[in-house]
Amino acid sequence: MAASKEKNERIDIRLNSEHKDALLRASALQGQSLSDFIITRSLDAANEVIRRHTVITLSLGDLERFVRALDEDAAPNAALRKAAAKYQKSG
């Protein structure tokens, strides 16, 4: 997180004392404030969830099949011809 960005948003959370104690202990062990620890770890988790939902990982075989499919000169099917005709008429 860039130090120059203004912090003007808040999140209020409630948690039990065991969870708070664990977070306080972990933040102290990392040499971070509780807020910085929670922000850093939460953003790490958020970025991982986003990555898992937005990045597609292919095996080498799948990648080769995908590239072959892109390289093939397949004839347009009826739905594609219809869509192209509709697009040309609209423009």
Image (cartoon, rainbow, N blue to C red):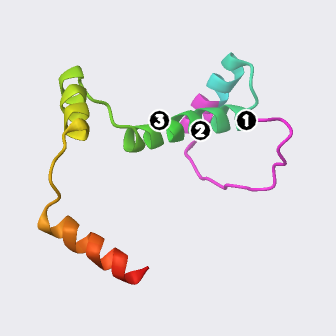
Q: Is residue 50 left or right of residue 32?
A: left
Amino acid type indicated by mark 3:
Glu
Local crowd at mark 2 within 10 Å, few (<14), some, or many (≥20)? few
Magenta part of the protein: which range?
1-23
Amino acid type indicated by mark 1:
Met
Percent coordinates x, y for residue 41 in the rendering:
59, 33
Q: Is residue 4 left or right of residue 37?
A: right
Taking the view exactly as shown, the residue that stands out farthest to the bottom is 90
Local crowd at mark 1 within 10 Å, few (<14), some, or many (≥20)? few
Q: Is residue 5 magenta?
A: yes
Q: Is residue 63 left or right of residue 2?
A: left
Percent coordinates x, y for residue 9 in the rendering:
75, 56
Q: Residue at x 74, y 19 (%)?
A: 31
- The vertical placement of 55 against 91, above or below, is above
Q: CA distance from mark 1 to mark 2?
A: 9 Å
CB of mark 2 within 8 Å of CB of mark 3? no
Q: Is residue 32 magenta?
A: no
- Residue that label 1 marks: 1
CB of mark 1 within 8 Å of CB of mark 2? yes
What numbered label is drawn on residue 13? none
What numbered label is drawn on residue 43? 2
Q: Residue at x 47, y 35 (%)?
A: 48
- Residue that label 3 marks: 48
Q: Quadrant of the N terminus?
A: top right
Q: CA distance from mark 2 to mark 3?
A: 8 Å
Percent coordinates x, y for residue 45 in the rendering:
51, 36
Which of the two residues, 9 or 35, is positioned nearer the viewer here?
A: 9
Q: CA distance from mark 3 to mark 1?
A: 16 Å
Percent coordinates x, y for residue 10 in the rendering:
73, 55
Q: Earlier in the sequence, mark 3 or mark 1?
A: 1
